[in-house]
Amino acid sequence: MLSQPLLRLVSAVSRRRMKLLLGIALLAYVASVWGNLINMRSIQENRELRIESRIEEIIEPLREKIRDLEKSFTQKYPPVKFLSEKDRKRILVTGGAGFVGSHLTDKLMMDGHEVTVVDNFFTGRKRNVEHWIGHENFELINHDVVEPLYIEVDQIYHLASPASPPNYMYNPIKTLKTNTIGTLNMLGLAKRVGARLLLASTSEVYGDPEVHPQTEDYWGHVNPIGPRACYDEGKRVAETMCYAYMKQEGVEVRVARIFNTFGPRMHMNDGRVVSNFILQALQGEPLTVYGSGSQTRAFQYVSDLVNGLVALMNSNVSSPVNLGNPEEHTILEFAQLIKNLVAVRELLASTGCALCHRCPGAPRILSQECLLPTVDQEIRVSDTTRLEWVWLNCVSKMWACPDPHFSQLQCLGWSVLAPSCLLPAWTVGQDRG
Ligand SMILES: O=c1ccn([C@@H]2O[C@H](COP(=O)(O)OP(=O)(O)O[C@H]3OC[C@@H](O)[C@H](O)[C@H]3O)[C@@H](O)[C@H]2O)c(=O)[nH]1
């Protein structure tokens, strides 16, 4: 038998042990719950990591594609000079998407100016200036100059008008409105904002000239009701408007009388002799020489004209200035040149009246520091060579083309449409000479 004190000792020890055991069990329980929690969290984290890496796997090729697309959409612009705020001008070019206007736009942009092109796209083409779209110095507005325009500019090159005979005779009333109301609107804008305006006039203001060559002091010989009157008289009144605004309102004006011009971006179907002959040769047709072919023209390359326009705009000469190549050729000579370069079957001499001679006369110096490019002997001599070069490069490539219709062919900027897309043929009876 155990004594009473011994029994008390034993029960006290087992109570303590019980407490200890209970404490240990509680700790073990807490530890296991904690462990489970940690385990669950790491499982969840693992799962999340797996999902994230799967998403990455799917997204990465897409990211790659976006990078490629971004690279291909990043527009590469022709090199543009940096001009300080003081030298940089805000320049409006009306008709800036056309043949001459787009080359002028190129020069002004590359010189570092801010250029706004306004065009109604009747004869202009967006693709002529598309290489500038998105550039911070460039803006393209689809607008008809017959409606007023409210913008802020320092200089206006006013070129908006159809210029080839079939185009301007297509809608003579519209041609008249463009050259009269359109010019009034641009002169109004020039007056409002204090801009200088250069009018792209034409050698056609001399009409069917009785004087040869036609210097700027010749008043011309124009039939006011002839087939070309909408253009000839439209440009004559546009010149009159310029000088009225100059005298009455103090607007600074420059007037360029532009002679025959050729070069890239000229529409093959615009109806003028260079494009007509090239197109006819491409299609294996005879060249249509109107009349005897003894009528003369002097063809200038478009970049020479553009340099002349910019030189004139920035000169102090406010009287009209002829811009053209003084090297004169008969149309027959021109046809022969093409005939010698390409195997053309025959030359067609029509019976139409074609006695007109057109040549800008001796080139003149605008001011001491501003020499018109037509004065440059090298350019004069090389013009025929350039024509041959354009001709050889375009034509030889096109002859090699397997498409018999030369549909939508692009060659050095010349666009050739399929025969079915051509404008109605330019007929002999419409020509003055
Ligand atoms: O197929 C043709 C086309 C034209 N010609 C002749 O080639 C000469 C030039 O005619 P174009 O149609 O090329 O141009 P034009 O000289 O008559 O007028 C042009 O010149 C100056 C620009 O300012 C004008 O915008 C434009 O009308 C004319 O004598 C014409 O009779 C042909 O012999 N065959």
Image (cartoon, rainbow, N blue to C red):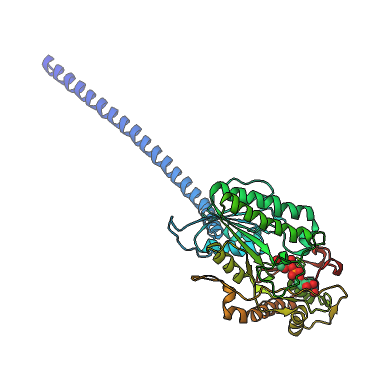
Using the image as rendered, state which of residue 425 and residue 169 is in the foreground.
Answer: 169
Residues 27 and 177: in front is 177
Note whether 410 is above or below 249 in the view shown. below
- Location of the C terminus (image quadrant): bottom right
Image region (quadrant) for ligand 1 = bottom right
All told, the count of numbered labels is 0
Q: Quadrant of residue 265?
A: bottom right
Outermost residue, right side: 351
Q: Is residue 405 above or below residue 129?
A: below
Q: Residue at x 47, y 57 (%)?
A: 88
The picture places residue 170, in percent across and down from the top left corner, at 80, 58
- What is the x, y in percent for residue 414? 69, 69
Q: Is residue 97 left or right of residue 427?
A: left
The residue furthest top is 4
The image quarter in which residue 307 lies: bottom right
The quarter holding residue 127 reads: bottom right
Q: Which residue is drawn at 75% across and 65% down?
A: 270
Q: Residue at x 31, y 33 (%)?
A: 31
Task: Judge by depth and name the residue closer to the eye, 133 or 144.
Answer: 144
- Residue 123 seen in render: no
- Between residue 35 and residue 422, name the one nearer to us: 422
- Image quadrant in which the N terminus is located: top left
| Position of residue 12 in the picture relative to residue 229 (left or right) | left
Q: Position of residue 221 (x, y in %)?
A: 76, 66
Q: Residue 101, how many percent across, how many down?
A: 63, 61
Q: Is residue 39 visible?
A: yes
